[in-house]
Amino acid sequence: MLRVGEHFERTDTGRQRRVNEDAFHARAPLFAVADGMGGAQAGEVASGTAVETIAAGIPADGRTVEARLAVAVREANGRIHDLSVSDDERAGMGTTLTAAWVGEKEVTLVHVGDSRCYRWREGRLERLTDDHSLVEEMVRQGRLTPEEAAIHPQRSIITRALGPEADVEPDTLTVPARGDDLFLLCSDGLTSMIGEDEIAEVLASTGSLEVAGRALVDRANEAGGRDNITVVLFRLEGVGTTAEEEVELTRLNMEAVAVPAAAAPAAAAVERRAPRAPREPEKRRGWRPGIGTLLIVVLVFVVASAGFLASQAVYFVGSDSEGFVTVYQGVPYELPAGIALYREDYASGLNISQLPPAQRQTVGEHQMRSLADANDLVRQLETGRVGVP
Ligand code: MG
């Protein structure tokens, strides 16, 4: 099973535009980039509406993820089109939209326009989307070479967008994915300024998504920054297979043994209590309380270590302070000193307010689970929202 291990996103106005008409969404399992166009603030309205519509929900019915993403894109198109015909200032506005949905074993893309999705795997950059642009169509017809297209003065003219027409035909595509795959969604403010060789060079130079994301934006600006630049990066990780869980548990147990920090607060608590507890004759003060304290400390250390080891092997599903459904490692309790016996393992993009009451209750129960079970539950809740068959 796949999940999003980390992500980084950045949008920049660039060096020549006054406003940023790009928009993005980055919350697992859905990532999207939209590049709006149109006078006044229409471009921002178009790209914002596209991203908000697809982020707000994808119909949960019996169809495939591709079909449902296409329905959401058509709905976004309809909203933008309605806004554009009802207001002269917004006439003709439009936006690109490239979105990626992370499934259990695959990533599904929906795409209109010339924003792009790339997959970076084992040092190789692969473009997954075809630009709906004049120059790319000319390349497909053999009238331009890719090199000529890259510097063509009309390279920013797109042939398909959300908004200009009452209906739109989005491309959809499902690609098999695996742990360590890195996906890049970007607006043409990146790809019209730097080549794919340079994108690959940046991705190869660092394992940090943040360093890579900032470097991509910086390089597009250094090359002129003629357009708004948006990059959304997310890296997948594989979870839930038996072998992987065993490796993970072994690693956690080794960490727990190697780091005595978990026992330290308990030991300190005993030492703070010790002066009050023994009411014994003065002459014994020199050694008996010392041994007693030592024994208690050792006992507490053993119990705390065992408890810590046990707590690290279990997980539960709950919601974080903002209401997002989260997988926690440990047990759902806090010690009186405010020491939490759990830590966040994975925060989903799903808010409990989006769930029906029965599912909300399941999240609130904080039932103890294996990592695989916890991830399964979150995946079910996520896919329940989007409706994976
Ligand atoms: Mg652009």
Image: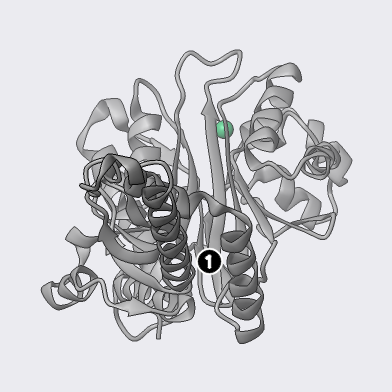
Query: Which quarter of the rendering shows the N terminus?
Result: bottom right
Seen as rendered, the residue at the extreme front is 283
Residue 16 place in picture, x, y as percent: 59, 13
Residue 67 in view here: yes
Q: Which residue is mark 1?
A: 3
Question: Quadrant for ligand 1?
Answer: top right
User: Which residue occupies 71% across, 33% down?
Assistant: 192
Residue 30 place in picture, x, y as percent: 45, 58
**Is 236 placed above or below 216 here?**
below
Q: Name the residue type under label 1.
A: Arg
Dot 1 crowding, Cα within 10 Å, few <14, some 14–19, many 20+ = many
Q: Nearer the viewer, residue 83 or 335?
A: 335
The type of colouring in the image is one colour
Is disc 1 placed on a helix, strand or loop?
A: strand
User: Which residue occupies 77% across, 43% down?
Assistant: 203
Q: Quadrant of residue 150?
A: top right
Residue 31 place in picture, x, y as percent: 48, 53
Residue 149 place in picture, x, y as percent: 80, 39
Counting the numbered discs, the total is: 1
**Is 331 placed above or below 78 here?**
below
Query: Which quarter of the rendering shows the C terminus?
Result: bottom left
- Determine whether, in the image, residue 15 is placed left or right of residue 54: right
Q: Nearer the viewer, residue 202 or 282?
A: 282
**Is 208 placed above or below 77 here?**
above
Residue 50 in view here: no
